[in-house]
Image (cartoon, helix red, strand yellow):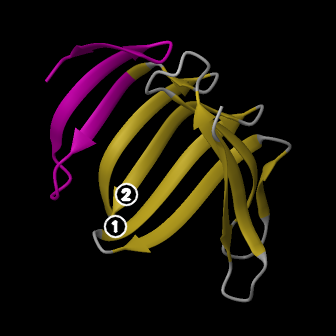
Amino acid sequence: NFKKNIKHYFEDGDLQCHSKFWKNKENSCIIENEYIICFDENKKQILTNGNGIYITKENSEYGQYEDYIQCVNYKADGESIYYKNGIIWRKENYKNGLKDGIEIEYNDNGVEEIIRKYNNGKFIERIK
């Protein structure tokens, strides 16, 4: 299986966060993530032994992105929130690393636009 390490660094070169991802064993479009370690802007550890919050901040040609992912045992677990240019653009719920529950996508003004339901990583239905 294809596996990729993703590391983000502070401007001074210190490691900010490290994760790995790969396609799941059935080769479907479900991607598995492992969140290793993460530090906040004050270099305080906020993800320890796979538990806590994993935060990434990235700039791209499409805007500034910030991801806040709740983790348990190196996997997303609970609510994860994603921002684009400082405005919420997606909320997802995870259980043991897989999407589980409601996913909400927002438009550029932060208004709910699409709502989907997942169960154990599988898409169930579009609610809105």
Which element is circle 2 on?
A: strand
User: Mark number for residue 52?
Assistant: none
Residue at the image point whose x is 86% and y is 43% from the top: 49
- At mark 1, the secondary structure is loop
Q: Position of residue 37 (x, y in %)?
A: 77, 54
Residue beneath the point at 25% across and 40% down: 105
The chief SS type of the magenta part is strand
Query: Residue at 74% across / 36% down in the picture?
Result: 74
Q: How many marks?
A: 2
In the rendered structure, does residue 122 fall within the stretch colored magenta?
yes
Give the amino acid at mark 2.
Answer: Tyr
Percent across and percent down for residue 103 are: 34, 29
Tell me the quarter of the image containing the N terminus: top right
Q: Mark 2: give few (<14), some (14-19) or many (20+) Cα within 10 Å.
A: some
Viewer-nearest residue: 26 or 99: 26
- The image position of residue 15, as x and y in percent, is 77, 71
In this view, 85 is above or below 124? below
Farthest front residue? 1
The residue under label 2 is 83
- Residue at position x 41%, y 51% in the image: 82
Q: Which mark is residue 86?
A: 1
**Residue at the far bottom in the pictured view:** 12
Packing grade of label 1 (10 A; few <14, some 14-19, many >=20) is few
Q: CA distance from mark 1 to mark 2?
A: 6 Å
The relative height of residue 122 versus residue 51 in the rendered view (above or below) is above
Start-end of magenta stretch: 102-128
What amino acid is at disc 1? Gly
59 vs 93, nearest the viewer: 59
Marks 1 and 2 close (CB-CB < 8 Å): yes
Q: Nearer the viewer, residue 95 or 123?
A: 123
